[in-house]
Image: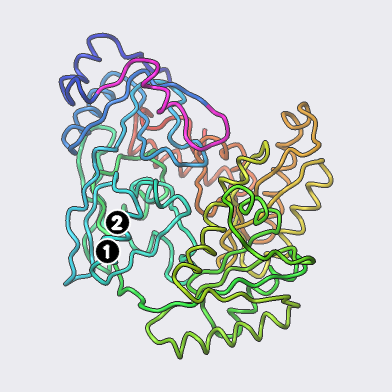
Amino acid sequence: MTFNKITPDKLAAIKAIVGDDAILTAQPALEKYSHDETEDLTYYPEVVAKPKTPEEVSALMKLCNENLIPVTPRGAGTGLSGGALPVMGGLLIAMERFNKIITIDEQNLQATVEPGVITEDFINAAAEKGLLYPIDPASKGSCFIGGNVSHGSGGPRVVKYGTIREYVLNLQVVLPCGDIIWTGANTLKYASGYNLTQLMIGSEGTLGIITKIVVKLIPLPTQSALMLASFPSNDAASAAVSAIFRAGVVPSALEFMERRGVEWVMEKDNIVFDLKDGVEAFLLIEVDGTNMDVIFADCEKINTVLEEFNCIDVLFGDTAAQKEELWRIRRTMAVSVKSNSIYKEEDCVVPRAALPQLIKGIKDIGVKYGFDSLCYGHAGDGNVHLNILKASMSDEDWNTKLKDGVSEIFELTVALGGTISGEHGIGLVQKEYMPIKYSEVHFALWRGIKQVFDKNGILNPGKIFN
């Protein structure tokens, strides 16, 4: 597809839609929108527009569709797959002015929000009414809920409460042609034709631009217990994960961390923690509910399982402050890793019982290619965030052979019954690995869907697949 540049007359038309104060064209102002949190990639848009209503988004899409101008939708820019990078230039539509929590319906346990609402702000607003929105990615303090929907984001509590797909009931979406539709209904059941809501979740802004989101809420658990269990090896810690579930306990969170990641967090964030000799891996385990007797009974079951896997020590977070400090170790790990090494982050997921094989395989592949690695992530649902560290790898090998190593990791992941992204999405940087998992039949179906929604291919071009 050959796209057109934004000419002065088209820029004037864009300004007429959103107003002069909602347009950016100067290079210094565009810099913020030229990158996300994906490595060191930079692509500048020609123009940034900041609409505030669905009608303005619709008018922008009609203009760009008629004139073959590429459009990249953007949330908070916290993505890790390059999904918000304007690789073809054109117009970037920033959704930051769509920042209202429209309603929290306590009667039906639902809420309607705009896509530019910060996820943690919405979680807190629901909690004030005794309700839980359990989708809480590590970047919840800065990411937008619209980006979470577009990427199928998750977080620690997915293991008990389910993925974002189970909480989004309905979406208002602007299509590339400018039409505004609701994808479904504000109901808990939906058996009325193809489920467009589910199709939009995880589509990474390639099929439409989300302008309103209706989500399901659940009653807020009032009590919780938090355990940090230490192990002599990655294998012991990862093997204990599926055993906890087999013992009949479903934690509200179950996170895996390697020792070096904890060390880097301690150094960067001045966290005081007794890191014992011989400890190589950790599980951070949360159990929640409304009855502390039941919670403690579950913790006792978990403790019995941990002992079977040579657990060295279990630290309980007794106070809210202690719990917050333990959670801070996990939530700040990505930032600490980024500040300590040249790295590339991958996001793969396997059935949880396959975690020991996956983590061991990652280490073996690193030895083969000469890179180091640090693993952490949502062990309870088999989702590993893999940080590949340059270590002693030469610049040439890092730039040429690393892709072969990543391919082998994904091949192992698929062989174990998994797939190449659990929650970060495919975007720009992962799409070359998609053939490892998916056949030409899949690609043909996806291209057909894209063509129906976006016949001119203007919306977020260059993402997910070619």
Tell me the magenta residue range.
23-41
- The residue carrying mark 2 is 122
Q: Place residue 355 in its image quadrant.
A: bottom right
Q: Place residue 207 in its image quadrant.
A: top left
- The residue carrying mark 1 is 126
Tag 2: residue type?
A: Phe
Q: Secondary structure at mark 2?
A: helix
Tag 1: residue type?
A: Ala
Query: Residue 330's spot in the image, x, y percent?
Result: 56, 58
Up/down of 396 relative to 249, above or below: above
Cα distance between the residues tagged 2 and 1? 6 Å
Q: Residue at x 43, y 35 (%)?
A: 84
- 30 inside magenta stretch: yes
Q: Secondary structure at mark 1?
A: helix
Q: Which mark is residue 92?
A: none
Disc 2 + disc 1, Cβ < 8 Å = yes
The N terminus lies in quadrant: top left
Up/down of 282 relative to 451, above or below: below
Of the pair 464 and 330, the residue shown nearer to us: 330
Q: Residues within 10 Å of mark 1 (few under 14, many from 20)?
A: many
Up/down of 218 relative to 403, above or below: below
Q: Residue at x 78, y 65 (%)?
A: 277
- 399 inside magenta stretch: no
Q: Is residue 332 left or right of residue 450?
A: right
Query: Residue 429's spot in the image, x, y percent?
Result: 56, 36
